[in-house]
Image (cartoon, grey):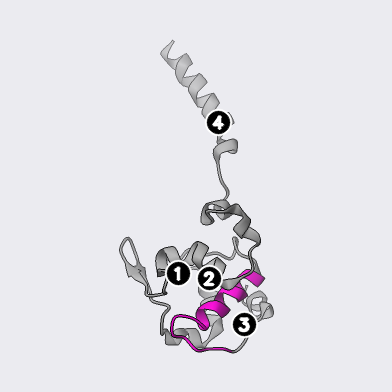
Amino acid sequence: MKSFKFAVAAAVALMASPVIAQSDADMMFEDPGMLTQTDGEDIYNAICSGCHMPEGEGAVGAGMYPALADNPNLEYPGYAIYLILHGQKAMPALGGVLSDEQIAAVVGYIRTSFGNDYADEVSVQEVTDTR
């Protein structure tokens, strides 16, 4: 009888898992509507600020999350584009979650915020070429 109960419980769990499972993209956003968002600041606040902090100051905890504020590496948009697409260490790869337009928008935002003054445009084509 005990093995029958286990089998029933396992079958229920397997049938329910597609219903309760979330895609990686859904898990990245508190609001699934963010998947279509194209404003760099909104994207940053929704998925980047949790690790890099609201003012881009970075953090140390379960991992090391570098400061984006006053970050000279952001002079080159390709640097941030590559890291967002492919990840590195504690930074997850978001190339499968964000569109090229979203990545261009968030890179443009961080390059002109938090004390950074790299105002040249980040194009969607740059992201597509890096992908």
The CA span between labels 2 and 3 is: 14 Å
Which numbered disc, 2 or 4, marks the residue that appears first in the sequence?
Answer: 4
Residue 22 is situated, as x and y percent measured from the top left of the image, at 56, 45
Numbered disc 2: secondary structure: helix
* 102 horizontally vs 89: left or right: right
Q: Residue at x 59, y 36 (%)?
A: 19
Q: Which residue is mark 3?
A: 122
Which numbered disc, 2 or 3, marks the residue that appears first in the sequence?
Answer: 2
Is residue 104 highlighted in magenta? Answer: yes
Residue 89 visible from this viewpoint? no
Residue 35 is situated, as x and y percent measured from the top left of the image, at 62, 59
The CA span between labels 3 and 1 is: 21 Å
- Kind of residue at badge 4: Leu
Q: Which residue is mark 2?
A: 84
Q: Which residue is mark 1?
A: 88
Quadrant the N terminus occupies: top left
Q: Which residue is mark 4?
A: 14
Q: Are marks 2 and 1 in contact (CB under 8 Å)?
A: no
Q: Residue at x 44, y 85 (%)?
A: 115
Which numbered disc, 3 or 1, marks the residue that appears first in the sequence?
Answer: 1
Is residue 95 highlighted in magenta? Answer: no
Q: Are marks 2 and 3 in contact (CB under 8 Å)?
A: no
Q: Which one is closest to the eye, mark 2 or mark 4?
A: 2
Neighbourhood count class around disc 4 (C-alpha, 10 Å): few under 14, some 14–19, many 20 upward: few
Residue 63 visible from this viewpoint? yes
- Kind of residue at badge 2: Ile
Numbered disc 3: secondary structure: loop
Q: In the figure, 125 relative to 26: above or below?
A: below
The CA span between labels 4 and 3 is: 44 Å
Numbered disc 4: secondary structure: helix
- Kind of residue at badge 3: Val
